[in-house]
Amino acid sequence: MEKKERKIVTPGEEIATTEEYVPGRNTYEDHGKIISLIYGFLDVNEKDLTASVLPIKTKPKIFVGATVYGRVVEVERGRAVIEVSVMVDKNNDLVEYVAIGRADLPRQREGDRDSGMMIGDLVRGKVIGIYKSELKIGLLGKNLGVLKTICPKCRTTMIRKGSLLFCPNCERTESRRVAEDYGDIVPEGVVR
Ligand SMILES: [Zn+2]
């Protein structure tokens, strides 16, 4: 059988009759008709002859403690604004999740002006607070922090050298609050 485009049905919509099919998930029967209970995709199974409606995938639910990935878009007065693009859901899957996060940067040492983070850094953080329009991101933890930095001078990906980051092209060094696995493989779709 040819695969048809998925049809969206609305609550109360008749999706089949009980002469043809058995009511499946998210449906009920009314006088020989199978009616959808929800807004979703029609799913007719020709094998066991059930007619169901499957929920349309919604934005994954964020939760305190979730690991998120994003890019630093602003650094100001000890705080970083992070454009979150991916979260790890409760099944440990990486799923797209777009939000703005704010993180307090770890305290800098005296005379260590560029310690912390810079615009463009790829970071891994943990959600420590959820507000209406943004997330509060924590960066304290051995796997949290910067995962990738581009040399601000020549745009080469910097490598870790001791406690500093080093540009193999122009030999510039930078100080960052790096995650323990800086430079290792990070999940696909995160690094451009
Ligand atoms: Zn460089």
Image: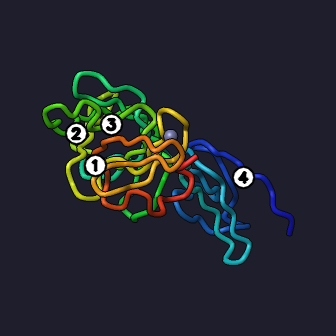
* Type of amino acid at the residue the image marks with label 4: Arg
Q: How many marks?
A: 4
Question: What quarter of the picture does the N terminus occupy?
Answer: bottom right
Task: Specify whether 8 is left or right of 72.
Answer: right
* Label 4 beta carbon within 8 A of ligand 1: no
Task: Calculate the distance from the C-alpha at mark 3 to the C-alpha at mark 1.
Answer: 16 Å
Query: Considering the numbered disc 1 on the image, is that residue within a helix, a strand or a loop?
Result: strand
Q: Can you give x and y, in whole percent of width and height, for residue 177 in the image?
A: 27, 46
Q: Earlier in the sequence, mark 4 or mark 2?
A: 4
Residues under numbered marks 4 and 1 in contact, where contact means CB atoms less than 8 Å apart: no
* Label 1 beta carbon within 8 A of ligand 1: no
Disc 4 marks which residue?
Answer: 6
> Which is more foreground, mark 2 or mark 1?
1
* Type of amino acid at the residue the image marks with label 3: Met
Query: Considering the numbered disc 4 on the image, is that residue within a helix, a strand or a loop?
Result: loop
Disc 2 marks which residue?
Answer: 129
Density class for disc 2 (Cα within 10 Å; few <14, some 14-19, many ≥20) is: some
Query: Considering the numbered disc 3 on the image, is that residue within a helix, a strand or a loop?
Result: loop
Give me the disc on residue 126.
1
- Report the residue at 56% width, 58% height from top: 29
- Position of residue 169 relative to residue 3, above or below, is above
> Which is more foreground, mark 3 or mark 2?
3
* Label 2 beta carbon within 8 A of ligand 1: no
- Report the residue at 72% width, 52% height from top: 6
Image quarter for residue 74?
top left
Q: Can you give x and y, in whole percent of width and height, for residue 125 in the image?
A: 31, 47
* Type of amino acid at the residue the image marks with label 2: Gly
Disc 3 marks which residue?
Answer: 117
* Type of amino acid at the residue the image marks with label 1: Lys
Viewer-nearest residue: 96 or 162: 162
